[in-house]
Amino acid sequence: MAIKALVFDAYGTLFDVQSVARVTGAAFPGHGEVITQIWRLKQLEYTWLRGLMGRYADFWQVTQDSLSYTLETLGLRATPELVAKIAEAYDALSLYPEARQALEQLAPLRLAIFSNGSAAMLERLVAQAGIGGLLETVISVDEIGVYKPDPRGYRHVETRLGLEREEILFVSSNGFDIAGAKAHGFRVARIARIPQETLQTELGAAGTIGPGLMF
């Protein structure tokens, strides 16, 4: 079957999650980078845990919970109000430089976003980036209450678009998302935000990464 729609992940694919570092760094000088990385790791982990446990909470709650964990682990104090303020950085992520042009050039095809983000978060994110006019729709896991890579999420995309899975090309930079979409039967395209050679170079220069840091 011919591809009729391209469906994009949002976080890390169209939008740079690393751009929150300017907010975390301003809130806790000298800790911005490590907060950003632990926060993102725990954010993903919490979605998987909630999925396995059947304890869905929207991505706004997950984002605040994972940030609270990060700050507590690092011994950094923050009021609930400050946690919420920092978490709002996910509503203002930077659009990757090539993303707008890519969407414009793909315009003859149906374009959509399918994301773990809550409906409200995605609405704000797309609006501030000014790409709403390029998309047919934005699909949030909120609509069914399960996180990717649960197969029900990808089935929901088919239902929302009224297409067969073979007619959809799913695009993501996240390996777990690509694996889930491919297992479901979508055609997939992975964006390598960090080329393999760059990753090997960075890991080689990092020295020993101990288990305390890794886990």
Image (tube, rainbow, N blue to C red):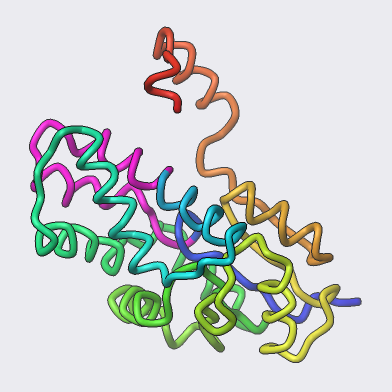
Residue for point 14% across, 42% down? 25
Q: Is residue 78 left or right of residue 91?
A: left
Q: Tell me: residue 76, above or below residue 208.
A: below
Q: Is residue 186 left or right of residue 119?
A: right
Q: Tell me: residue 43, above or below residue 9.
A: above
The percent coordinates of residue 154 (x first, y second) are 70, 72
Residue for point 26% across, 66% down? 92
Residue for point 25% across, 40% down? 35
The percent coordinates of residue 36 (x first, y second) are 29, 43
184 and 171: which is toward the camera: 184
77 and 20: which is toward the camera: 77
The percent coordinates of residue 37 (x first, y second) are 35, 39
Q: Is residue 49 left or right of residue 184?
A: left
The percent coordinates of residue 110 (x first, y second) are 65, 84
Residue furthest right as drawn:
1
Q: Tell me: residue 41, above or below residue 2.
A: above
The quadrant where residue 3 appears: bottom right
Query: Looking at the magenta stretch, what is its main secondary structure?
Result: helix
Question: Which image quarter holds the C terminus?
Answer: top left
Residue for point 26% across, 52% down? 20
Count of marks placed on residues: 0
Q: Tell me: residue 173, above or below residue 94.
A: above
Asked whether 16 falls inside the magenta stretch, the response is: yes
- Range of the magenta residues? 14-41
The quadrant where residue 141 appears: bottom right
Asked whether 17 falls inside the magenta stretch, the response is: yes
Question: Which image quarter holds the N terminus?
Answer: bottom right
